[in-house]
Image (cartoon, coloured by chain):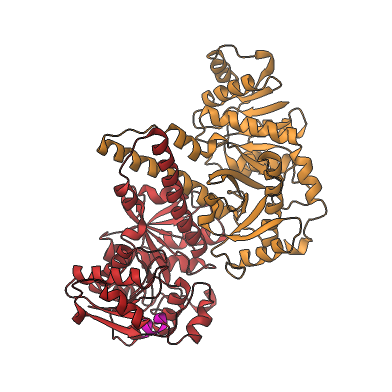
Chain colours: A orange, B red
């Protein structure tokens, strides 16, 4: 198993990436990593860790970094020697089995679309995120890759999410919900009204109907499908609400001079803990980690990548979506 | 000050409405209330409270109730003797200064649109919700009234929110943010890209630019504008995340055998505490309370209604939006 890791992506790159990589190497003896980025800086970070299995790490020096503020399409075209573009190309050329980055989501997605290409039957690959729920986990997709989508895209997301939940979350027959503003089939906007009809008519989707914002964390389904605008807003809102709660809770503990150990609670609420958002629907395994990732989140993204490779996720998606592409007129 | 209260709307009607009404009457000696609904049931509830100023309460018996599951437009047309329709009509005829309901949001909105009519210059009235934030409060609109909107509707929402924040939140020059998936002006979907241009070009809006999901509770602005689909999903998600968080916290306290008093924390997170969502942009004061409202939330919705009347909010909106209506071609 060989994975390329963009070492320049996170807010504290490359220290965080290297620490995460070292953790992953210790965890999986069959793992080989290619670290991409400023070779000197990466080597310096590697030398700070003891017992690194150097026979399983290779550093590939790249001279460019794509920043979150850049236009993804332009940056990917112009920065051919960036850690993201070089890493995705290594994956395209099958030098590695997967690619992981905590850098620009847009650029990672653009580079993957251009180089790996969408699988046949997939019009719009989607980014999934595994959130905590009262029942364990729930996969939300799309989380920001596609902001103006059509009903048939949401339908495809349902298939992508189903495979991911089967292969990586261990759910045999994943329940799929359509994020909407009411449970009834006749509730919603133009997009969800039509998507509901399509999902309800597809025998290959275990469609449980519309779900509301309140149902996401309640464990009513394993996969929640929405457009990338709503998904992105929700995910960022979730992050900030969790930290707002934590702040109010700390104030309360200080006021009452009572101290709870909150580390387990935070771990449960922190989706980066088991996270690493997969880009689903391309011909390859691309995992996007959060820019603010701590080392364990990088390690977990590498873990998710390895499991996706082992499970044969890409083949499963390809087989399921083959022949399902929309006729061009419908896109 | 005379307000009509739908006593049949909440999940525990009319007990909750009557208790909230009694609280409001005690709080404001100048308040008169009209309670609408099943007269016998309301009288029975009233008799359970001591010291009710009966000279300031009138019960108006209505024979029909509109349920949340009904199509709002049809229900409002057919159920002419429902508490919602009768209450809104009393407001239209200026028998009361405001109308409050914890019943069907859709029906309350439909009845208000039909009977009170949108103010000149307002194409789509919007529902606002006052959420807690790190800086105190933030008004989000629209929260579910309008699911397929155009850029000029978001622009109008910004004006409606500005007036509400001035009149009811006491903010002199409210900062308005456009909910989006990135801070840069060129980020977003078709709707927000154009709405951004419109808001940035309007000298009467204190536009702080795009805000992301994470900024809502961070106090970066006083008013956040979004379409009703996103708003509805966000609000319901907020509710459930708050209760999920509380559940995890209780588990943690039991595990550690440490007990914090969480009543203040819950009060801060509970938006119904100061809530009551205003329907902004109609020629009248309609306040929508949550269906799961406890009595204090009903009391607060009545308080918000009274303050909107006192502040002259409807006149302020009318003056600001006069002459701003879109030419028909743009709608």
Relative to residue B264, is residue B49 depicted above or below? below
Q: How many marks?
A: 0
Name the outermost residue toward the left.
B29
The answer to which of A18 and A103 lies nearer the viewer is: A18
Can the viewer see residue B24? yes
Q: Which percent across, then down, holds residue A303?
A: 64, 30
Is residue A54 located in the magenta-colored stretch of the structure? no
Residue found 50% across the figure and 56% down from its top: A214
The answer to which of B83 and B2 lies nearer the viewer is: B83
Quarter in which the N terminus of chain B is drawn: bottom left
The answer to which of A247 and B19 lies nearer the viewer is: B19
Locate residue B117: give its quadrant: bottom left
Residue found 45% across the figure and 37% down from its top: A265
Locate residue B8: give its quadrant: bottom left
Q: Which percent across, then down, holds residue A271?
A: 53, 39
Q: Which percent across, then down, holds residue B220?
A: 36, 49
Is residue B87 located in the magenta-colored stretch of the structure? yes
Relative to residue B99, is residue B163 depicted above or below? above
Dominant secondary-structure state across the stretch colored magenta: helix
The answer to which of B298 and B216 lies nearer the viewer is: B298
Relative to residue B43, is residue A283 depicted above or below? above
Residue found 21% across the figure and 80% down from its top: B54
Lateral position of residue B318 relative to residue A179, left or right = left
Magenta-drawn segment: B83-89
Can the viewer see residue B183? no
Locate residue A117: give its quadrant: top right
Relative to residue B222, is residue A250 depicted above or below? above
Q: Which percent across, then down, holds residue A138?
A: 59, 46
């Amino acid at each position: 198993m060989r994975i390329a890791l963009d070492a320049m992506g996170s807010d504290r790159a490359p220290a965080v990436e290297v620490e995460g990589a070292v953790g992953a190497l210790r965890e999986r003896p069959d793992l080989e990593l290619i670290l991409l980025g400023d070779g000197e800086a990466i080597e310096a970070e590697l030398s700070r860790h003891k017992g690194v299995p150097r026979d399983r790490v290779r550093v590939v020096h790249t001279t460019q970094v794509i920043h979150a503020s850049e236009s993804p399409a332009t940056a990917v075209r112009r920065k051919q020697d960036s850690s993201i573009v070089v890493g995705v190309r290594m994956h395209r050329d099958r030098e590695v089995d997967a690619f992981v980055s905590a850098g620009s989501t847009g650029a990672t997605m653009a580079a993957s679309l251009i180089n790996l290409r969408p699988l046949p039957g997939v019009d719009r690959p989607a980014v999934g995120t595994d959130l905590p729920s009262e029942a364990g986990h729930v996969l939300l997709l799309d989380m920001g890759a596609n902001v103006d989508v059509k009903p048939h895209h949401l339908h495809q997301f349902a298939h992508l999410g189903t495979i991911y939940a089967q292969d990586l979350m261990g759910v045999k027959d994943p329940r799929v919900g359509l994020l909407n503003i009411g449970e009834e089939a006749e509730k919603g906007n133009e997009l969800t009204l039509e998507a509901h009809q399509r999902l309800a008519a597809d025998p290959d989707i275990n469609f449980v109907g519309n779900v509301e914002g309140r149902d996401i964390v309640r464990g009513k389904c394993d996969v929640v499908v929405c457009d990338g605008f709503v998904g992105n807003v929700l995910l960022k809102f979730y992050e900030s609400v969790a930290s707002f709660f934590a702040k109010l809770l700390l104030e309360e503990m200080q006021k009452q001079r009572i101290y709870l150990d909150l580390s387990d609670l935070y771990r449960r609420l922190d989706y980066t803990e088991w996270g690493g958002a997969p880009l689903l629907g391309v011909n390859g395994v691309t995992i996007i980690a959060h820019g603010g990732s701590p080392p364990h989140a990088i390690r977990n993204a590498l873990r998710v990548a390895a499991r996706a490779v082992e499970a044969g996720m890409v083949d499963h998606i390809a087989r399921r979506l083959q022949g399902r592409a929309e006729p061009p007129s419908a896109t």
